[in-house]
Image (cartoon, grey):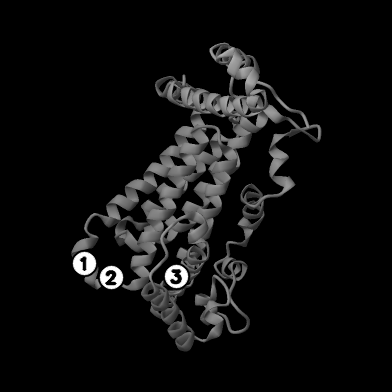
Amino acid sequence: MHKKHNLFFKDFDKSFSEVLSKGLKNLDAKKLRKNRDKLPQIIEESLEAYEEIITSTYVDKHKFKIDEFLKRSHRNQENIIEENKESFVCFLLYINTCVLIYDKITEDLDKIEGELSTTFKIAISFYGLCVRRGQQIAELLMSGYVDAAMIIWRSLYENAVILLTLVINDNEELSTRFIKHSSKNSFRKAKGYQENHEELKFPSLNEETLNSLKRKKEDLINEYGKDYFSNDYGWANMIFEKGPANFRRLEERIELSRYRPYYTLCSEQIHSSFNGLDRFKENNKIILPKLLDQEEELKGLIDPMQFTAAILDEINDYIIWEFSVECELNANLIFIRKLFDKLAASFKK
């Protein structure tokens, strides 16, 4: 193994030797000779005391300056944006337009909440979540973290598939099953917590909570059948004539399968595999400094930008159709399409 001196502390051995020498000089020489057999213990205790002092000193008197860190981060963001200005302008324009849409359609919903269907409420909530994911992706790309943006894109896509599945089927029973299915994860989280709380030194869940979650799960199985909790998409079994629901089948049903290759590519950034290192290779060798470098070139930014806008565009077709008055519908659809086309055109320059 390649061991490194001074990983955290400069001249650790030398400094300890000096401290130890000074300490031994202050000891009574006769006592030291008389208790020579205790010398290893004295050295060990001195080392422990030295380790405690030096680590506390480095933690308490660190030289990290948050203001300089922020300035450097902002400067890096400015450089990345300046290098790819037109594409960033178009991308942020699209994301901000989605924010405006969301703000507009939710501003008065509290006044008519009692009139809204379960499907409609889920759709609006998930649209907000998808727009949030778009904002997060924009922030990560401005900082040059393309792989992190790909991880968030996978979440965006999964949320979009759920949203579109629910609104295209427009079935209150399906939406209700989707909401109730969340109890599966609630039970799984509680069970995992309970199995590990002692090791984590956390308090135990009370018996009433655990029993309540267990009863809820059993009641839902009795209501919808054992296949309801067979996988994460058991709530959607009712829309398929044969076989259990799964993510790929939902994807195919709403005709989004064309995004599967990018979804698979993004999965490599989430699930540990050697392929996750591909973007840091040159001539089939991993370039270690690149692992901490920010990506600045447009070629690395294009896919997260265009696929983010593309998924939001799929959702916006529904949102604009649902919320536009008839006389503005066509113009609204053309407008959002032109924003997307403008972004796509910026990649060709």
Name the residue tied to disc 3. Answer: 182
Give the quadrant of residue 31. top right
Name the residue tied to disc 2. Answer: 116
Indicate the amino acid at tag 1: Ile
Q: Give how far apart the Cα atoms at labels 3 and 2 are.
A: 21 Å
Residue 270 place in picture, x, y as percent: 61, 50
Q: Give how far apart the Cα atoms at labels 1 and 2 are.
A: 7 Å
Q: Residue at x 35, y 68 (%)?
A: 120
Label 1 close to label 2 by CB (< 8 Å): yes
Farthest residue, direction left: 111
Give the quadrant of residue 257. bottom right
Name the residue tied to disc 1. Answer: 112
Residue 273 lies left or right of residue 55; in this view the side is right
Q: Give how far apart the Cα atoms at labels 3 and 1 are.
A: 26 Å
Residue 46 place in picture, x, y as percent: 57, 24
Vertical comparison of 10 with 335: above or below = above
Residue 207 place in picture, x, y as percent: 39, 74
Give the quadrant of residue 301. top right
Vertical comparison of 221 with 292: above or below = below
Q: Decide which of tag 3 and tag 1 comes sooner along the chain.
A: 1
Q: Residue at x 33, y 52 (%)?
A: 102
The kind of secondary structure element at disc 1 is helix
Residue in the foreground of this view, choosing between 4 and 282 = 4
Indicate the amino acid at tag 3: Ser
The kind of secondary structure element at disc 3 is helix
Q: Decide which of tag 3 and tag 2 comes sooner along the chain.
A: 2
